[in-house]
Image (spheres, rainbow, N blue to C red):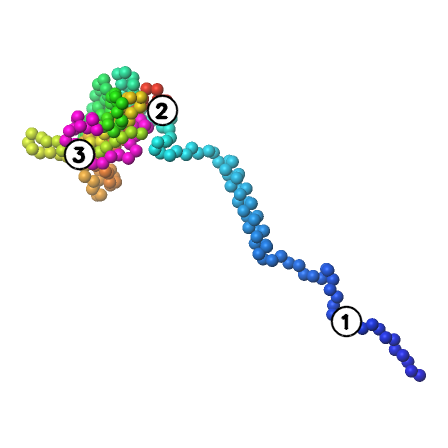
Amino acid sequence: MTVKMPTYPAMSMTPAVTGSGIACHTSHRRVLLFLGIGLLVAIGAVAGIAALVAPAVAIYHCPPQCGSPPQGTPQDGLPVFAGADNSFTVEYYPESPDWHAGTDASGVTDERLTGAGGALRMFGTAAGGRTAQQVVTALVQQAYPNATQRYQLTNAMVGYQLGYGEVDEIIPQSSDGSYQPQSLVVMASVKGDVALVGEAIGPYQPWDPDTGPWDGHPSGVAMAVAGDLDQLINSFSWAGDPAR
């Protein structure tokens, strides 16, 4: 007897592909793009917070906007000279073993008694419509007709007011024919037709890198007393200026 075997549909050996069997992944370029965007957002947030928290800083373009002079009580306690018409005030070095001080109606003179010597002169005068440079030029020509200008001072200030200044050389003649070169610094500023002037004159001191003066730092002025004027020149104040 013949036995008939049942037949079955042919079966494929290729596995079925379903939706859940597809492997998904994000490209490296997209990952880097997302990271970059996130980093930029974080940086922007930090910068924004810092801008809101940081105090506002005044920005000056000097000159002509050079800010305001410091406010507060002077620490040196120097005496103050007031002009006869109270149009200005200025500090000066009082009488001491180092200084001889003298005053007149227009200002004050300080003569240095130690070191290389020299003298300071701080005073006020009518500007008469002149600029600070014209005031300085006229004063130098009148008091020191043989002075030779070495250079002009950049952004010179007197009493925290932008003005003009120059450094000159003077060779005074003596009765015996000897001479010693002198340096002269003259600075002035004008406000309300009142010119305030600071002068320093003293022996020319060539700079030496080994012996100084000025602790070995070079100086274009080459005069020790010029440093003393620097300590006083912005103590000038015109009538009506705010207290410092």
Q: Is residue 150 above or below residue 27?
A: above
For label 3, the SS is: strand
> Disc number at residue 12?
1
Asked if the residues shown at circle 1 and circle 2 are in contact, with their CB atoms under 8 angstroms apart, the answer is: no
For label 1, the SS is: loop
Q: Position of residue 114 (x, y in %)?
A: 19, 30
Q: Which residue occupies 50% across, 37% down?
A: 51
Q: Which residue occupies 20% across, 26% down?
A: 138
Q: Is residue 179 visible?
A: yes
Mark with earlier residue (3, 1): 1
The verdict on residue 151 being magenta is yes
Q: Position of residue 9 (x, y in %)?
A: 83, 72
The verdict on residue 101 being magenta is no
Q: Is residue 3 above or below residue 55?
A: below
Residue where numbered disc 3 is placed: 148
Q: Position of residue 153 (x, y in %)?
A: 26, 34
Could you give the CA–CA distance between mark 1 and mark 2, rounded to whole angstroms? 100 Å
